Amino acid sequence: MHETNYSIELQDITVTKNKHLILDDISFKVPMGITTIIVGLLGSGKSTLLKVINSIIVPDSGKVLVNEKPYTSMSATAIKTYRRSSGFVFQDSALWANKTVFQNLELPLLYHFPDMDKEDVIYKVKRTLNMLGFEGDINKRPSDISAGNRKLISFARALITDPDILMIDSPETSIDFATHKRIISIIKDLKLRGKTLIICTYDEHITSMLADHVVVLFNKKIYASGSYREIVTSNDPVVKQIMSHVLDKVSNFDGDILNLINPDLS
Amino acid sequence: MIEKIGANIREKVTNFSYAAGFFLSLIKESFFFLRQKHVGFKVLTMQILFTGFEALSVITLLGVALGVVIIVQGLAILPQFGQGDLIFTILDVVITRELGPLLTAFVIIARSATAISTELGNMVVSNEIEAYVSVGIDPISYLAVPRFLGVTISIILLNLYFNLAGLVGSYFIAQFIHPVTFAEYFRNLLIFSKPASIFISLFKSLVFGIIISFTATYNGFRVEGSTTEIPQVVIKSVGQGLTLCIIANAIITALSHLWF
């Protein structure tokens, strides 16, 4: 298992937006070195939770502890080092529209490694894109490439600094079948390399094939949390409903059938 | 009723403290920016190009037009009262001290403040700001500071250029209407102009630059998630920029009369 130097813990997190409660008193320690899947019904706050874990969104109350220290009290240098070790893939890709594909990947490198040679930057950008299977023109702007390619570039931008922790928001959104397969294989590869992955998804393939730990969001709170097996075999009606929604009724199978499908789960 | 007033006051205090915090961050990050090998230098260059260089033609036109009007009207009216030399004092006061910095500021508000607020607002809506945070880049340091410095540097340079166009360029145009000898015009301009006017003019530009770039970046970042908020923050940028520049201009003019 890949060892990461970081621990992330949420303590009593509450988030509101335009006076609407999005997350209510959430406490959660992110399991490191494994794949955690966040599931929940539409509008349950999955994306917000992921952004809070990554400290992109500042909660109204509560703390995000990185290595047992509140993120807000970390020094600029410590934050910079932490950001280099954690990546985030946005649901809508969120590429910088006024930059080319190359510049979108170049910027994090130039920021984190200001002394890196221009040739090394070009090499690293091209290698990352090749690794992800991007074959488009790197001098095009995001608006000139397909949604699937934008998603791949978003992955590349998050992975360019080789982070230990990767948070992925709905990787299955707005992509074609081929890109979907490609993205699953990228996530599988990251899992095999022992990265800490935190993914919010509706995708039954990603969840059933990759989840080690599952967090179920319901009614703005963490309703259930546990190993993949514990969650899919749960008899709780809410968990069953949410998991059947995500896994296309896999949770309706009993434990024995699950063992037949994937003996490693037992 | 009282609850509503209280909530309103609380919101105003929160907004003010947020704006004050943003302003302090902007100043602090500006010092760090100039000291570091920063990835935002390209953004700064582009901002100076857009705000400073691309506004040269408008500033030239305004400066020359204002200078011509003052020279033509002044030379037609003032000699009738035996005050022909007063034209140079008027040129100094109107172009250098008052309208130069103020009209330059108005042009920058119309061209750059609106563009900055729109661009930043769009970036908020499309999650691009969050993307900067996710890779570790501070949006204030990378996006706001280069715009803050770019606008402030550009407005100072444009004001100097406005003065040049208003005092020198206008002379040549005015020759067609009311001929004055070149040597006489510039000798009198140097005699009747006060050195303090240049200092006051540049100081005003510095203050206007800070006001315009601060209101534009602050309002741009205030967009929360909807494209319909963008025109609203642009209107706020323009309104606040104009109001604060006019107030600052009046205060600096009043103080300068006490000190100089």
Image (cartoon, rainbow, N blue to C red):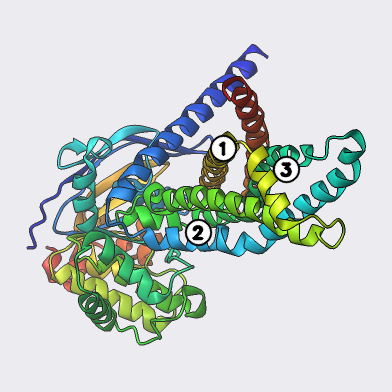
Q: Circle 3 is placed at which residue position?
A: B91
Q: Mark 1 to mark 2: distance in Å?
A: 27 Å
Chain bearing tag 3 is B
Check disc 3 and give the amino acid type. Leu
Q: Give how far across and how far down residue B58 sits, in percent.
A: 69, 60
Residue at horizontal 61 percent and vertical 31 percent from the top: B248
For label 2, the residue is: B48
* Lower position in the chain sequence, tag 1 or tag 2: 2
Tell me the tag on residue B195.
1
What kind of residue is marked 2? Ile
In front of the other: A172 or B64: B64
- Which of the 4 image quadrants contains residue B195? top right
Give the x, y percent position of residue A180: 37, 77
Chain hosting mark 1:
B
Q: Depth check: A238 or A58 in front?
A: A58
Query: Quick check: A105 left or right of B149?
Result: left
* Sooner in the amino-acid sequence: mark 3 or mark 2: 2
> Can marks 1 and 2 be said to lie on one chain?
yes
